[in-house]
Amino acid sequence: MRLTDQPTHSLVGVIKMPDKVESPTRAIVKRVIGALAALLLAVFIVYLDRDGYRDVNGDGVSLLDSFYYATVSLSTTGYGDITPASSTARLVNVLVITPLRVLFLIVLVGTTLEVLTERSRQAMRIQKWRRVVRDHVVVVGYGTKGRSAVAALLGDGVEPGSIVVVDTVQESLDAASAIGLVTVHGSGTRNDVLRVAGAARARAIVVAPNRDDTAVLVTLTARELAPKAQIVASVRERENEHLLRQSGADSVVVSSETAGRLLGMATATPSVVDMVEDLLTPDAGLAIAERDVEPGEIGGSPRHLADIVLGVVRDGQLYRVDAPEADAIEHGDRLLYVKKVTPPAGD
């Protein structure tokens, strides 16, 4: 059966929503507080209606007896020396004490029950996510290239919950989930896997597998599902670049040539390589960014702005700053420029 035809609860092992990290101490304290709250509520109810209970000693039900009865009742011990005698007390036991007993056991045995309820919670979260996910980024392949792409996206301010990682290696998916990304277990070459990842509604798809032939198949599948999405693909060899473009990739990065070019430059001008690395690292220093033009900049030259402008994007076409088309800024243009990045506080 296709993944897209399966009910949501069957996708729990395929899609994983990021979990909120909580310390064990905090989780235990919360459960203990919940158990105490249930116990105190039961004590209050029993003591409030103490005249409706019978004690074998015949001396009535005191506050201590109420604590005793609530404790043995909620823990399902039930010695029977204190029993509800009136109709009201028995009704309260049915409608209140019994649900509190169940709640008490759930809190105390929460670790075991949590495993059983995790699939239900994940199914509900997956169902909600699939209903509302739009304009997200799908990253196919979470190896070295995929991780670097995600780091760049996060550095540009993209929310972790807006990034979906598709991979077949569970260790890679666990690493992605640990930083708050949504993960989908499966091959990006499969149509139904990309559908589950919401590729049809994604604004961008990053294709970063380890093999060029896989990258071509993923790009073909992604373009069929998402005709309007921006598809960026990585390829190891230049000779395969045209295959990716023919498959529908909007941008292609040749990883081997790029790395080789930097290696060659480093032998003669290592400072240039350092600058390129700085520009490509979004965390601190300098970074290449894109922004809308401001009203006061229209009609002016991009070379005369306070920002260091590298190019002008007009109607989806990039013009270098020295191109004739970029002599004057027009309405609707976007500027590719160098910005200074301030490192996060504490770094």
Image (cartoon, rainbow, N blue to C red):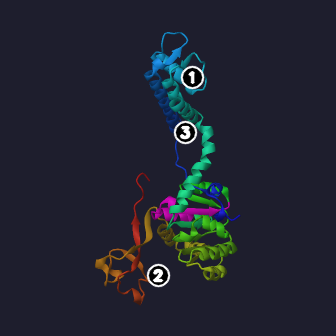
Q: CA distance from mark 3 to mark 1?
A: 28 Å
Q: Label 3 belongs to which residue?
A: 24
Q: At label 2, which amino acid type do we have?
A: Gly
Name the residue rendered at 31%, 79% in the picture. 297
Q: Is residue 323 magenta?
A: no
Q: Residue furthest toward the front?
A: 87
For residue 146, say whether it is visible: yes
Please give the range of residues in magenta: 147-168
Q: Label 1 belongs to which residue?
A: 72
For residue 260, say whether it is visible: no
Q: Which is more N-terminal, label 2 or label 1?
A: 1
Q: CA distance from mark 2 to mark 3?
A: 50 Å
Tag 2: Cα neighbours inside 10 Å, few (<14), some, or many (≥20)?
A: few
Tag 1: Cα neighbours inside 10 Å, few (<14), some, or many (≥20)?
A: some
**Of residues 17 and 154, the one drawn nearer to the viewer in this rendering:** 17
329 shown above or below 143: below
Tag 3: Cα neighbours inside 10 Å, few (<14), some, or many (≥20)?
A: few
Q: Which mark is residue 316?
A: 2
Q: Which is more N-terminal, label 3 or label 2?
A: 3
